[in-house]
């Protein structure tokens, strides 16, 4: 008999126009809300932030706005947000944005009542996505998440990616009390997302579904929703990059990101994600989804014959013509199919083409974490990194 665990505590409000409910959702948790976003000076997002504030105010909720989230959120930024939340006696935290805003908000909620944060201990202690954790402090804040990208799935997970800029490091930590209490997923909010960011975040969602599908701990639930997520992304993302305002495609990608996040939170990622975080620690200017896209062709050339049945199933999502082919043949086609998919969304670029310097690649390849990752021997991991540095996109 098969045994598995599954846990998803986040209440979901999905659908176009659901942002209008945000006042009622947040108001259930208190009357003083810390709104966590990127800078308020961004022309595209400022109207959204103003709209959220009006909706909260109409529900009788006072708003304290922390608008200093940066891509690859840093320790210092998180600590500043925690201090503001304490000074203002926040009752609830609302994150509106992509993965960086939601991850920052998770850390605020988790560490709100902690007297001091030993980040070195945090990074070494909370590494297991399946652990049942004790509270870090006597008081935590509830989190409501409103994603504005269809990619990270952070609104459905217990994971936070935090950058330690002083050490050129980027760490992912997990705590089962970091799941958002509720998520309002409104695809209309994503219609203004530019094509490149649509592609970058969309492929990130694909990797969450695919990598959790590969894991030994994948369950019937995670495999089912992971396959659904991949089908949605393969069918929608190339079209959406060409037609960013298409609400039907935005809905498909929003569902896919949500499903992939649920799968990820229960089965976890594999080899490409820690490699991407190593590169991101050295070069935080690169988007996480682009780093993954750059790593995937080399990763799949190594992976496809290690898990032929699963890789064959995914290859058939890309090419239904492989339905009758043997698993070994279908699996062998997967690296090429994904490479063509990356070309179709403009993400098939080597690290050298993206501007990673040889010195930065050497620093990434020398990272001691490569010697302890469980997915493959160090020489294989270094080979995937270096092989992703100078490949040339074929026309």
Image: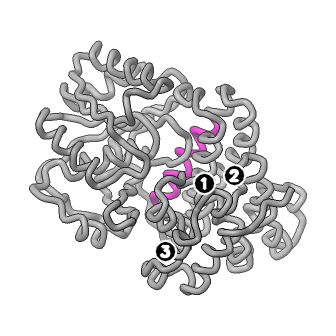
**Residue at figure coordinates x 82%, y 76% from the top left:** 328
Of 141 and 263, nearer the camera is 141
**How far across and how far down the image is residue 35, in percent?**
30, 32
**How far across and how far down the image is residue 13, in percent?**
45, 32
**Lower position in the chain sequence, tag 2 or tag 1:** 1
Task: Please report contact status of discs 2 and 1: CB closer than 8 Å, yes or no.
Answer: yes
Q: Check disc 3: other Cα within 10 Å, few if <14, some if 14-19, many if 20+.
A: some
Residue position marked by numbered label 1 in the rendering? 290
Label placed on residue 363:
3
**Residue at figure coordinates x 53%, y 54% from the top left:** 286
Q: Quadrant of the N terminus?
A: bottom right
Residue, far top: 58
**How far across and how far down the image is residue 384, in percent?**
64, 75
**How far across and how far down the image is residue 170, in percent?**
40, 63
State how far apart marks 3 and 2 are (Cα): 23 Å
Q: Is residue 257 magenta?
A: yes
Q: Is residue 159 visible?
A: no
**Residue at figure coordinates x 87%, y 62% from the top left:** 322
Of 133 and 56, nearer the camera is 56
Instruction: Name which quarter of the figure residue 165 lies in.
Output: bottom left
Instruction: Name which quarter of the figure residue 236 lies in.
Output: top right
Q: Which residues are magenta?
A: 252-267
**Lower position in the chain sequence, tag 3 or tag 2:** 2
Q: Check disc 2: other Cα within 10 Å, few if <14, some if 14-19, many if 20+.
A: many
State how far apart marks 2 and 1 are (Cα): 7 Å
Instruction: Name which quarter of the figure residue 75 lies in.
Output: bottom left
Residue position marked by numbered label 2 in the rendering? 347
State how far apart marks 3 and 1 are (Cα): 19 Å
Please state if 330 lies on the left or on the right of 183 as rendered. right
Residue 252, compared with residue 78, is above or below; it is above
Q: Nearer the viewer, mark 3 or mark 1?
A: 3
Residue 155, compared with residue 164, is above or below; it is above
């Amino acid at each position: 008999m098969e045994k598995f665990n599954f846990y998803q505590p986040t209440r979901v409000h999905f659908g176009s126009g659901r942002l209008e409910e945000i006042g009622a959702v947040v108001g259930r948790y208190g009357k003083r809300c810390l709104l966590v976003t990127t800078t308020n000076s961004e022309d595209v997002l400022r109207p959204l932030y103003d709209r959220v504030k009006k909706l909260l105010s109409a529900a009788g909720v006072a708003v304290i706005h922390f608008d200093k989230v940066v891509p690859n959120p840093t320790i210092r930024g998180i600590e500043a947000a925690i201090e503001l939340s304490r000074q203002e006696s926040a009752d609830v935290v609302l994150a509106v944005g992509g993965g960086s805003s939601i991850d920052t908000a998770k850390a605020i909620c988790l560490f709100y009542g902690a007297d001091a944060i030993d980040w070195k201990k945090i990074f070494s202690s909370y590494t297991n996505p399946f652990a049942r954790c004790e509270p870090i402090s006597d008081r935590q804040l509830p989190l409501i998440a409103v994603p504005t990208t269809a990619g990270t799935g952070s609104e459905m997970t217990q994971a936070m990616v935090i950058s330690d800029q002083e050490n050129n490091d980027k760490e992912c930590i997990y705590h089962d009390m970091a799941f958002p209490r509720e998520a309002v997923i409104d695809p209309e909010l994503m219609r203004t997302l530019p094509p490149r960011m649509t592609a970058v975040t969309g492929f990130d969602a694909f990797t969450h579904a695919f990598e959790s599908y590969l894991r030994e701990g994948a369950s019937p639930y995670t495999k089912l929703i992971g396959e659904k997520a991949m089908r949605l992304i393969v069918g929608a993302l190339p079209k959406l990059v060409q037609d960013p305002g298409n609400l039907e495609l935005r809905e498909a990608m929003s569902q896919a990101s949500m499903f992939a996040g649920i799968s990820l939170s229960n089965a976890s990622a594999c080899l490409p994600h820690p490699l991407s975080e190593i590169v991101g620690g050295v070069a935080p200017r690169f988007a996480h989804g682009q780093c993954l896209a750059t790593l995937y062709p080399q990763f799949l050339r190594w992976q496809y014959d290690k898990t032929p049945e699963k890789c064959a199933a995914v290859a058939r999502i890309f090419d239904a013509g492989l339905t009758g082919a043997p698993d070994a043949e279908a699996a062998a086609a997967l690296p090429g199919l994904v490479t063509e998919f990356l070309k179709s969304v403009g993400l098939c670029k080597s690290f050298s083409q993206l501007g990673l310097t040889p010195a930065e690649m050497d620093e990434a390849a020398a990272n001691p974490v490569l010697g302890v990752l469980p997915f493959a021997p160090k020489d294989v991991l270094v080979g995937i990194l270096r092989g992703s540095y100078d490949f040339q996109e074929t026309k």
